[in-house]
Image (spheres, rainbow, N blue to C red):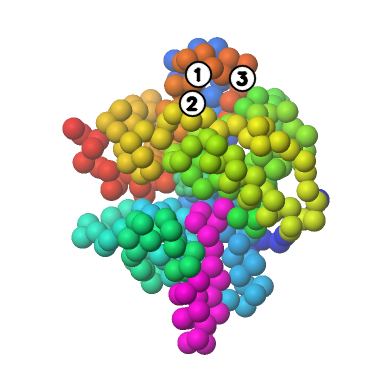
Amino acid sequence: MSLPSALKFANLPTKIEKLDRLSKELGDVEIYIKRDDQTGTEISGNKIRKLEFAVKEALEQKCDYLITCGGIQSNHARATAAIAARLGLKSYLVLRGTREDDIEGNYFLDKILGADIKFIAPEDYRERRTDIMLELADELNRKGHKAYVIPEGASNGIGTFGYYRAMEEILKQEVDLGFKFDAIVTAVGSGGTYAGLFYANLAYKNSAKIIGFNVCDDSSYFKERIKNILEDSFKYTGERIEFSKDDINIMDGYVGKGYAISSPEEIRFIHRFAKLEGIILDPVYTGKAMLGLVGEIEKGKLKHYRKILFIHTGGIFGVFSKKDMFFL
Ligand SMILES: *Cc1c(COP(=O)(O)O)cnc(C)c1O
């Protein structure tokens, strides 16, 4: 299948490492981690893989402004600001909330990377973020710019190919490792990462189960959302793959107090994991997803899976805005 073309910014392939001590604690299971938190520094995390495709399309359309949206600590918004600056483009970030006096984490990086920033109220974010981005694009276009709008998380048809490619990368790495993973696990926030992994897993008729842990909304919301993202991506390749929504495996139960809200239990888990394995998970996505994975294994729900690959999708800068919770 021929994929759309892409820019090359991420440090690829990202390493796959075994989590020796966690695996031992859980017994009878081997957990590996794919270090997509090491795709880069300013661009670190999963969003760069999707942006490599989306921003290529923006350049092909001769755009000079990237507009996107997210929460105040959005990893995706920060990666967009970084790639825009790397390419000599401008970025405009529509962030949910009001300006925080504490200029911290990703928001701090957005500012030093030169992004234009507009804050909008949570209800406007929920109901009107796309319209608001399109209005901004109109305004910039009237001033002689050409704006390209990237949806939340770059989770659309074009962005999906980032994790299609990542799945191909995993299949190659399995050859070197000499074994295959029974399950591949990711956090799910806007669905594009899951969609790309799922798409390539189907296209290659690979036997692994792709398991997502949602960090907002619920499983039925994401089954629908991921189906729609995939429909959108089939338009790019001209090849549709048949699947049932029920093949999309999203595990409910680990959203906790809500999107980007941490509980003391989650923070304690991130802290314990850091000391155990020397790897920092983030409070919004990977901390909840890894807690979910460990929780499901402990409940005996994943017994059929002996070799599990967890994708560390990044988010390191998000820990700084929660630092006070680590030492309560
Ligand atoms: C955005 C994000 C995710 C979720 O990926 P989606 O493709 O939006 O579902 C997971 N982890 C981190 C660190 C992220 O920034």
Residue 257 versus residue 8 in the image, above or below? above
State the CA–CA distance, disc 1 to disc 2: 6 Å
Disc 3 marks a residue whose amino acid type is: Tyr
Q: Do the residues labelled 1 and 2 touch (CB within 8 Å)?
A: yes
State the CA–CA distance, disc 2 to disc 3: 12 Å
- Percent x, y of residue 146: 55, 79
x 43%, y 58%: residue: 127
Q: Disc 1 or 3, which lies upstream in sequence?
A: 1
Q: Residues within 10 Å of mark 3 (few under 14, many from 20)?
A: some
x 47%, y 58%: residue: 79
Of the numbered discs in the image, which one, if any, rests on residue 305?
Answer: 3
Of the numbered discs in the image, which one, if any, rests on residue 20?
Answer: none
Q: Is residue 151 magenta?
A: yes
Q: Nearer the viewer, residue 311 or 207?
A: 207
The part of the chain drawn in magenta is 134-155
Residue 124 versus residue 190 in the image, above or below? below
Which quadrant holds the C terminus? Answer: top left
- Percent x, y of residue 153: 51, 54
- In terms of secondary structure, where does tag 2 sit? helix
| Res 109 → quadrant | bottom left
Which residue was labeled with disc 1? Answer: 297
Q: Is residue 65 visible?
A: no
Disc 2 marks a residue whose amino acid type is: Leu
Which residue was labeled with disc 2? Answer: 293
- In terms of secondary structure, where does tag 1 sit? helix
Q: Residues within 10 Å of mark 1 (few under 14, many from 20)?
A: some
Left or right of 258 in this view: 134: right
